[in-house]
Amino acid sequence: MKKVVLAYSGGLDTSIIIPWLKEKYGYEVIAMAADLGQGEELEPLEEKAENSGAQKIYIEDVRREFVEEYIFPTLKAGAVYEGKYLLGTSMARPLIAKKLVEIAAKEGAEAIAHGATGKGNDQVRFELGVKALAPELKIVAPWREWDIRSRDDAIDYAQERGIPVPVTKDRPYSMDRNLWHLSHEGGDLEDPGKEPPEDVLLLTVSPEKAPDVPTYVELSFERGVPRRLNGEEVDPVTLLEKLNALGGANGVGVVDMVENRLVGMKSRGVYETPGGTILYLAHRELELLTLDRNTLHFKEQLATRYAELVYDGVWFSPLREAMDAFVDRTQRTVTGTVRMKLYKGNCTPAGVTSPYSLYDEELATFNEDEVYSQADAEGFINLFGLPLKVQAIMEKKTGLK
């Protein structure tokens, strides 16, 4: 029998795809689940995949690779999609695609399959990853082929075949969880005019239920990469796990947004990114202290484009690699320690130090100093404002408005 490797999560869509692939194409289905930090969600996957009809399942522990090779480069770039989304799902998809390709080669499979819908971004992310790494592989996307048109249809399909799924018509949210975040879409969240129900949140408490006293977190970075938490050196996976617990307990990192999907429509999602929010804000504070004005401002422009590349699934591209080279050059001095204050949904700086600090107290002081002549500012302002002055004179002379 010909083989297909399925990106498997154990959720509704991928659970029903296994029997569908066998019925439709006669494939032998090899399931692959990437351990990105889903925790207890992975425990029943082997039994579930076999009960759904998979020949075998690979559960690949890629947590450290995910953090070091995907999260940290995006963090260093400062990439945030549309000013709010910290790209938790987007960063994970190219790594999953990479693992699918590796297992397809090992198993001699002719195709890759995924459970992304024809309306979403993930179909693009998975398939661009496969095209970049193994263009000879076929790609099967059931949502673009089958007669199932809704999540209710999918639930019915599963029940008819006796396949247990973790979704009901009462709680129909589509969720994606990894070390970086937990996303929620669908159901009553599809109405952006309504506040999300509180029971949507699973990693994070609401600010109203957070402690009445602040929690302080100290992060130490080396060349833009976080290395120590509260003075203790920790591995990247443990670092994120601890920050998620601290941020979640203080209501930090919840984003409710209407975003522009790559495929042309808007969608509403609720994202929980407690640890990632702390890291982003801490890294930003350190850059404000250590990067010069021109570099910082240009990097902000690059960050927007970097976020679009990641969101669009163009991870394996020459442009992203070139951007990484620029970003790494900027991070040479992004070393130091940042103290963050977590309090009822807020994450604010409470002190930052660096051996490469560009802040000079003697220059910035409002008290008397010996290094700055305030009289020099007059000539600077005259030259800096000369184009404005010339424009104003011309307009007054000609009557132009």
Image (spheres, rainbow, N blue to C red):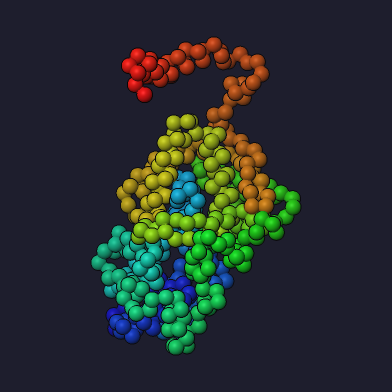
Q: Quadrant of residue 197?
A: bottom right
105 or 29, nearer to the observer: 29
Asked which quadrant contains residue 256, the reply is: bottom right
Give the residue displayed 38% in from the left and 16% down from the top: 396
Q: Residue at x 35, y 55 (%)?
A: 314
| Count of numbered marks | 0
View extreme (right): residue:
212
In the image, residue 253 lies at what x, y percent?
58, 54
User: Which quadrant of the figure contains the N terminus?
Assistant: bottom left
> How far from the left and from the top, in percent, is residue 127?
33, 64
* Residue 197 or residue 366, whichever sits in front: 197
Q: Is residue 229 left or right of residue 126?
A: right
Estimate the x, y position of residue 285 in percent, counting from the top left. Answer: 56, 39
Q: Is residue 206 left or right of residue 178?
A: right
The extreme left residue here reads 136
The residue sitting at 41% across, 55% down in the picture is 260
Q: Is residue 309 left or right of residue 49?
A: left
Instruction: From the top left corner, tell me how far across and down residue 140 is, in percent.
Output: 31, 73
- Above or below, 228 relative to 39: above
Residue drawn at (35%, 18%), measured in percent from left and top? 399
Please say whether residue 390 is visible from this viewpoint: no
Given residues 312 and 361, the one toward you in this image is 312
Quadrant where the C terminus is found in the figure: top left
Specify whether residue 219 is in view: yes
Q: Relative to residue 97, is residue 13 depicted above or below? A: below
